[in-house]
Image: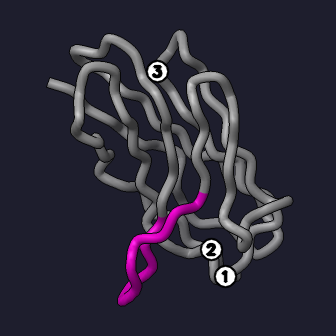
Amino acid sequence: QVHLVESGGGLVQPGGSLRVSCTASGSILGIYTMGWYRQAPGKQRDLVATITSSGTTTYANSVKGRFTISRDNAKNTVYLQMNSLKPEDTAVYYCNADLVGSSRRYWGQGTQVTVSS
């Protein structure tokens, strides 16, 4: 059994910063790519950023230069540092992980990020 648990969401003013975290636990041999997605009300779930086990990152164009994804392999944890937040960044943020020895992609339960004055 594997679980991904996000934390760190909340309410922040436009222009502010927030960091969300996601920790994987359970029967884990290793983790390939970890990523963050987000889903705003009435919209589809979209990719925000990914990071491989070696640290290669990708970002959605809408967050480049504002968001930074990182990970701590020893802690099976991925982070998303969000700066210069905009109201359009408001969404539920989900993390995922592709695990060694598994064809299934695991997802967290999501954490709400609200950017509003």
Q: Label 2 neighbourhood size at 10 Å, few (<14), some (14-19), many (20+)?
A: many
Please tell me how crowded label 3 is: few (under 14), some (14-19), or many (20+) other residues with Cα within 10 Å: some
Question: Magenta stretch containing residue 54, yes or no?
Answer: no
Label 2 belongs to which residue? 89
| Vertical position of residue 100 compared to residue 70: above or below | above
Residue 55 position within the rendered picture, expressed as x and y whole percent measured from the top left:
68, 28
Spot occupied by residue 103 in the image (x, y as percentages of width and height): 23, 35
Q: Which is nearer the eye, 18 or 39?
A: 39
Location of residue 112 (image quadrant): bottom left
Give the Cα distance between marks 1 and 3: 30 Å
Q: Which residues are magenta?
A: 38-48
Q: Which residue in the structure is indicated by mark 1?
A: 87
Q: Amino acid under label 3?
A: Asn
Q: Dot 1, how many residues are within 10 Å of its Cα: few (below 14), some (14-19), or many (20+)?
A: some
Q: Secondary structure at mark 3?
A: loop
Residue drawn 35% across and 38% down? 5
